[in-house]
Amino acid sequence: MGEPQGSMRILVTGGSGLVGRAIQKVVADGARLPGEDWVFVSSKDADLTDAAQTRALFEKVRPTHVIHLAAMVGGLFRNIKYNLDFWRKNIHINDNVLHSAFEVGAQKVVSCLSTCIFPDKTSYPIDETMIHNGPPHSSNFGYSYAKRMIDVQNRAYFQQHGCTFTAVIPTNVFGPHDNFSIEDGHVLPGLIHKVHLAKSRSSALTVWGTGRPRRQFIYSLVGAARGTAVPQNVSWSCRAGCGEDLARLFIWVLREYNEVEPIILSVGEEDEVSIQEVAEAVVEAMDFHGEVTFDTTKSDGQFKKTASNGKLRAYLPDFRFTPFKQAVQETCAWFTDNYEQARK
Ligand code: NAP
Ligand code: GFB
């Protein structure tokens, strides 16, 4: 474990969401260093689309560091319906957060982009240099352009004021505390919820689209289900062969990644899976024996967005991700155990 780095007050926006809850658990389970004060906030603390509320929150907390997760988030089908809302809400949230952080003198801000914001027509694998090289997939242009502007704004804060405002680019994330809404959420939580309902109704599972699109998935938090303890015998600096999963990678970026240029946080290209394979993993994890059908009238969305984790590997050559099937099993177990209070 590293030595205390002096007094740090870390504000995490979006602290009640999938990624925020995972970081909160890792911090509570031992990642917090002496001298660190972590503050997790949700929309109940401030509506970050509102400049005055955002400014008041930052003046109250006076963070030295910020992990900025808050966003309007959704799966393919929510994005298709609400491109305008995704653009406006996220543009407002991001400008309010970045500028409030600047005004209170925060030393570092780590914001969150997504691999879906890269150009749709591109060569593969996608890397960090390609963000602005062409239009994103039409299904989520509102979200994608709003997210791309974080990168523009980070570079401008650095150029004019020397700020270390940076961003990470995760692939599709999943885990406990996800949004399991079938209409609004992402594919993995959606399929888990659908299988749960199909089992209770003895009906078929309907997978949307052809099942052929391909995705890389990153788990939010290793060992999250059924009270499994996060391993304590690992270096939080991730230099000793640990580094599992997104929550810890965020903490590594906060403490040790000092570039303004973003960094992709992804499993390897070889770990990309088809949506059909995703459905099969959920069916197996939930011990579902009913019929599985594909509704090809529903959109497939972007066919693939295969990203390189070469830059991450150059920093952290030895780290391990939780195997996909294990992570799916843990998430299914969490959903089953927490069905009543899960977001759905
Ligand atoms: P999430 O579970 O939907 O959580 C969203 C968070 O943002 C919640 O804490 C929510 O607060 C907060 N929020 C939303 N609107 C707000 C507002 N107007 N004011 C204040 N807070 C607001 O999202 P997530 O999946 O954890 O995503 C976290 C970050 O990762 C986002 O920036 C997202 O774009 C990015 N990302 C996600 C994925 C993915 O697959 N999920 C992939 C790549 C990147 P309430 O709980 O109070 O509503
Ligand atoms: O996770 P998802 O909604 O988003 O996955 P994207 C969509 C893919 O899964 C499509 C198929 O190929 C769908 O046809 N699919 C199959 C399903 N069954 C289902 C289901 O029950 N629910 C859902 N949602 N999909 C999102 C972006 O793209 O990626 C967001 O739109 C976000 O902006 C996120 O950034 C990370 O991977 O297509």
Image: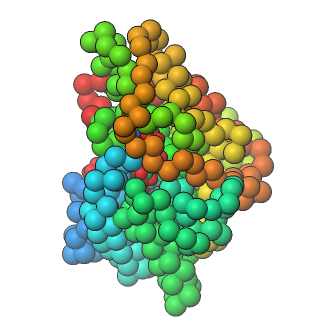
Residue located at (49% from left, 44% from top): 173
| Among the 4 quarters of the image, the one containing residue 200 | top left
> In the picture shown, does residue 232 fall above or below 269?
above
How many numbered markers are drawn? Answer: 0
Q: Is residue 190 left or right of residue 43?
A: right
> In the picture shown, does residue 182 fall above or below 167?
above
x%, y% of residue 300?
45, 43
Furthest-bottom residue in this view: 160
Residue located at (55% from left, 36% from top): 212
Q: Is residue 113 visible?
A: no
Q: Is residue 187 left or right of residue 89?
A: right
Q: Is residue 152 visible?
A: yes
> In the picture shown, does residue 178 fall above or below 160?
above
Q: How is the image coloured?
A: rainbow
Depth check: give the residue in front, 208 or 254: 208
Residue located at (43% from left, 27% from top): 294
x%, y% of residue 138?
42, 60
| Among the 4 quarters of the image, the one containing residue 273 | top right
Q: Is residue 250 left or right of residue 76?
A: right
x%, y% of residue 27?
49, 45
> In the picture shown, does residue 14 fall above or below 300?
below
Furthest-front residue in this view: 297
Question: Which quarter of the rendered picture does the C terminus lie within?
Answer: top left
Residue located at (53% from left, 29% from top): 276
Depth check: give the residue in front, 194 or 313: 194
x%, y% of residue 11?
40, 61
Depth check: give the residue in front, 33 or 212: 212
